[in-house]
Image: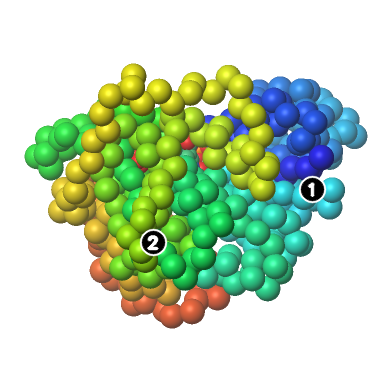
Amino acid sequence: MKQISLLGATGSIGTQTLDVIRNHPEAFRLAAFSAGRNLNLTRKIISEFHPALVSVADKEDCARLKTEFGDSPVVLYGEKGMVETAVYAESDILVNAVLGSVGLLPTLEAIRAGKTVAIANKETLVTAGHLVMDAARRAETEILPIDSEHSAIFQCLQGENRDEIERLIITASGGSFRDYTREQLETVTVKDALNHPNWSMGAKITVDSATMMNKGLEVIEAHWLFGLPFEKIDTILHRESIIHSLVEFRDSSVKAQLGMPDMRIPIQYALGFPKRLPLPDAKRLDLAEIGRLHFEKMDEERFYCLKLAYEAGKAGGSMPAVLNAANEVAVHAFLQEKISFLQIDQLIEKALARHNVIIHPDLETIWAVDRETRDYVASLI
Ligand SMILES: NC(=O)C1=CN([C@@H]2O[C@H](COP(=O)(O)OP(=O)(O)OC[C@H]3O[C@@H](n4cnc5c(N)ncnc54)[C@H](OP(=O)(O)O)[C@@H]3O)[C@@H](O)[C@H]2O)C=CC1
Ligand SMILES: CC(=O)[C@@H](O)[C@H](O)COP(=O)(O)O
Ligand SMILES: [Mn+2]
């Protein structure tokens, strides 16, 4: 039985992780979880899964839950509560499904406490992948990818030697506006952006998918998870999201992982690893029914955020933390209808242009850069 701590239990990945736990009571138990501000769903999760520890974003919500539930579970709040959830003594695995760079500190603390980390929270790896991977090496803990492309690559690499990889090929659906010109993007709305063709996900990542920043973040995520230079990480437009990514080896052989777009598959693979557990109600892949799969070269001028992400990744040091913080603030402002869709990449480009890269930034420096970037982009908005 694996005991699980889950950050971001009330979100898209969080609720699908709960589905996986619910379907396999013989294999998994929810020991502790964190939520943000969705108190009703938090109450339901407590009542169904009876965890020992829960954390919410706000002090007032914490007090409310304590009044309602008494001594069990223990209820905490804020950053400290998330860290306590991540390092909860009974837990074997941390599932990090929280949104944004707030996931960084709990991830580092969980690694230091010797937990295996199953990670969906790509902003953490983009902000400080060097610190996360270094901590994992020191503590000799595993970082297991949940992001569908990285799970695909991880699955392709089982039984392979990483020195024999020629390149990674990360697939991109193209998001909500894949057939729009830059001119057409001038007038798109939040509602349009949230209409992803293949995946049902949280609002922020759905907008990232439409700007192609999601793929940019995933390129940096892959750089850290698989230890490859950016020159060996390619992207390709693949409309159907059936091939989740590919690995080319030095003998020119290519392996791919395929499946219907269902995030429970990579979540369950990470939680069950190295075992593959059954997923009986998953829709099975029927290639004859699908008929054709499509591929197109990625246009970096059209999908400008991808270009910015490669540049930030190659610059290294503190630059990806700037990319991520600027993107988080800009996407939030777009979702609140304070800026237009095309202003997202303009704001990120400005934040990157004014930053002098700091090499080998420690955690304190990363937080200073993150805060400073957020303040700068907010001042422009
Ligand atoms: N959704 C998907 O299919 C995929 C997502 N990912 C990645 O997984 C992560 C989560 O995405 P997704 O599930 O879509 O996001 P959602 O917006 O659906 O969920 C985010 C979760 O984080 C919580 N949260 C948000 N901000 C804070 C905060 N400041 N403090 C504490 N908790 C907070 C939310 O709480 P509440 O709602 O209670 O306020 C919620 O539980 C992202 O990094 C995303 O890029 C990767 C691959 C696929
Ligand atoms: C499900 C998942 O992993 C998302 O990150 C997905 O990749 C989004 O789709 P695109 O970014 O390819 O549109
Ligand atoms: Mn992905």
Disc 1 versus disc 2: distance between alpha carbons? Answer: 37 Å
User: Label 2 belongs to which residue?
Assistant: 249
Q: Is 322 placed left or right of 302 in the picture?
A: right
Does the Cβ of the disc 1 residue fall within 8 Å of ligand 1? no
**Total residue callouts:** 2
Q: Dot 1 corresponds to which residue?
A: 91
Q: Which of marks 1 and 2 is in front?
A: 2
Query: Which residue is at a point 39% across and 55% down the rendered structure image?
Result: 247
Residue 326 in the image, given as x and y percentages of width and height:
36, 56
Q: Is mark 2 within 8 Å of ligand 3?
A: no
Residue 270, percent from left and from top: 62, 45
> Which of the two discs, 1 and 2, labels the residue nearer the N terminus?
1
Q: Nearer the viewer, residue 136 or 89?
A: 136
Amino acid of disc 2: Phe
- Can residue 232 be seen here? The reply is yes
Q: Which residue lies furthest to the left in this view?
A: 183
Q: In this view, does 364 lie above or below 109?
A: below
Which is nearer the eye, 66 or 17? 17
